[in-house]
Amino acid sequence: MNLDPVDQRHLSIHEAGHAVVGRALGMACGHVTIVKDDDSAGHSITDDPYFILQAWEDAGRYRDFSSVMTGRIMAYMAGAEAETVILGFSRGGDGDDREQAMLMAEDMGKDETFLSRARRQTRRVVRRHRAAIEAVAAELLASGTLQALEVDRLFEQHCDR
């Protein structure tokens, strides 16, 4: 990918934000990459909401489906929020993230007030887990892609519980 170093840093923080916040919210997450593919400059994977709900129930954490969807919305918001908190501003490029968050909120019957609250809550989670986001971002800059277990390890090493 031919991004200048500043753009690469923003992209790595953005994708690390998704990956770390998803984990901080107890969601099953997969790999994260800043390697360009046909659809995007990078991505982070959060599992299917029904899989997450079942995993929570298996662990004795009984939540309703709206909790899973709120967590997914926050995970989508986390990329731009991580850029803003850590780098001072977001370079954009989160249009699809915003659209997906809005669609999920609409499906839940929620409005802009809900999304504003979720964004503030996401910002708090980003601040709390900043060290983990920066650690994942540094590894992404070095290798381009991290498998789920690598991200899990970095999260555990740097998480603030």
Image (cartoon, helix red, strand yellow):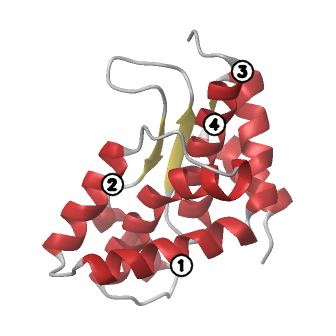
From the image, tell me which residue sits under label 2. 98
Circles 1 and 3: CB distance less than 8 Å?
A: no
Q: Is residue 153 visible?
A: no
The local crowd at label 2, few if under 14, some if 14 to 19, many if 20 or more residues have their Cα within 10 Å, is some
Of pointers 3 and 4, the one earlier in the residue sequence: 3
Look at the picture and state if 18 lies above or below 137: below
**As shown in the figure, which amino acid type bears the numbered disc 3?**
Pro
Marker disc for residue 5:
3
Q: CA distance from mark 1 to mark 2?
A: 15 Å
Up-down relation of residue 24 to residue 146 (above or below): below
Secondary structure at badge 1 equals helix
User: For the view shown, which residue lies furthest in the right direction?
Assistant: 157
Residue at the spot 55% in from the left edge and 46% down from the top edge: 90
Measuring from the top left, give residue 64's x and y in whole percent.
31, 87
Q: Report the amino acid beneath label 2.
A: Arg
Q: Earlier in the sequence, mark 1 or mark 2?
A: 2
Q: Using a 10 Å C-alpha cutoff, classify the residue at mark 1 as few (fewer than 14 neighbours), some (14 to 19) or many (20 or more).
A: some
Q: Quadrant of residue 69?
A: bottom left
Q: Amino acid at mark 1?
A: Gln
Residue 51, position in %: x, y? 34, 63
Mark 2 secondary-structure assignment: helix
Residue visible at 33% across and 54% down in the picture: 98
Q: What is the quadrant of the C terminus in the image? A: bottom right
What distance separates the C-alpha of mark 4 from that of mark 2? 17 Å
Q: Are marks 3 and 4 in contact (CB under 8 Å)?
A: no
At x 66%, y 16%, the residue is 4
Most extreme residue toward the front is: 89
Which label's residue is closer to the chain start, 4 or 1?
A: 4
Name which of mark 4 and mark 2 comes first in the sequence: 4
